[in-house]
Amino acid sequence: MDPCTQGLLGAVLSASIAKKKQLKIATFAGGIGGIAPDLDILIQSSNDPLLFIEYHRHFTHSLFFAPFGGILVTLFLYVFLKHKISFKYLYLFTTLGFFSHGLLDSCTSYGTTLYWPISNDRVAWNIISIIDPVYTLSLIISAFLCLKYKSIILVRIGLFSSFIYLALGYIKHQKISNYIYSIAEQRGHKIERILLNPTIGNNILWRTIYKFENFYYINAVHMPVFNLPKFKNGIKLKVIDKETIFPELGKESVQRIDIRRFSYFSQNYIYLHPSYDNVIADLRYGTLPYDDKSLWGIKINSNNQESHIEFLNLRKFEKRDYSEFWSLLKGNF
């Protein structure tokens, strides 16, 4: 989720358990704690382009790291706030913010190592977009009313409303899953893997991907709150194997290992990009919800197996892409 929303959730969550006289500090400390886990973006290497995606949403986002992360943030803030609040309460507020960060990120599709070090699986519940103005606005209103009227009740109502929004996202995810399974059955397909993502900024228009035999089927689904769903048939892509694609690469070569790392990051939804030579891309995201225009990928250089791959930003949004996206979002299929 975007840092603004992460900070807002941390602020509102901390304020919801604070005393009235603590509201301002609780909101501030919770907000800082809510943003802090994203400092992992500083973990980068000019020699290893995949290091930043490998460690973004990694240990700093784990539920088990939150108490330690909370201590670090508290030690920093206590230098400035020690005359206004006790260390105990400051730690409580910053840790709640820190704790909320990984949980909210897990609600998106990017993937978060929520249970590290017990598990390295990337958790992605896919119930909210990485940017959702409706959800963010609900937190902004909640935080504003809390500080303006110094009301614990109002902030709790706002927090509860944000949870309801996430719950509705989960319900919609289940409905779309059932809908796609029925579409696949009509096609005579038996789904082996499925991924459902709300597109950017909303939970009405979704990108859906399922695997059958040796192909991925990408489609768009429009599912508003009350009307019946609409379906747009999209791209069909061949599945690739991270261990056998580019067979000239050695099994333990740097580039083969990098392909495995990128596949892990992409939840193994990878494919050969049809518009670029020797590029493996992340199928989870596209320019439009039914296309094969991924937002990022890696370029393989078989002639230099022991050097790291090149990470590519493939975002190329054109005016017609924005126009079609808005048309699809309005249900014009």
Image (cartoon, helix red, strand yellow):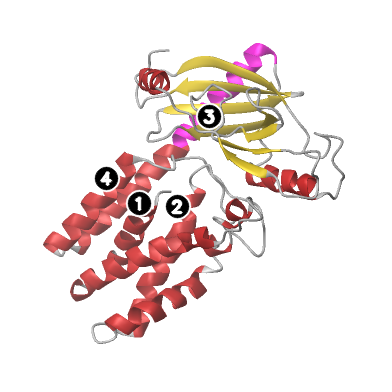
**How far is disc 4 from disc 2 in space, using C-alphas?**
15 Å
Q: Amino acid at mark 1?
A: Thr
Image: 224 above or below 10: above
Is residue 287 shown left or right of residue 302? left
Quarter location, residue 312: top right
- Residue at the spot 31% in from the left edge and 54% down from the top edge: 159
**How far is disc 3 from disc 4 in space, using C-alphas?**
26 Å
Q: Earlier in the sequence, mark 3 or mark 2?
A: 2
Is disc 2 in contact with disc 1, using a CB cutoff of under 8 Å? yes
Structural crowding at the residue carrying mark 2, measured as other residues with C-alpha within 10 Å and reported as few (<14), some (14–19) or many (≥20): many
**How far is disc 2 from disc 1 in space, using C-alphas?**
9 Å
What residue would you read off at disc 4? 137
Secondary element at image label 4: helix
Q: Amino acid at mark 2?
A: Leu
**How far is disc 4 from disc 1 in space, using C-alphas?**
9 Å
Q: Amino acid at mark 4?
A: Leu
**Which-is-in-front pick, marks 1 and 3?**
3
Is residue 98 shown left or right of residue 148? right
What residue would you read off at disc 2? 104
Is disc 4 in contact with disc 1, using a CB cutoff of under 8 Å? no
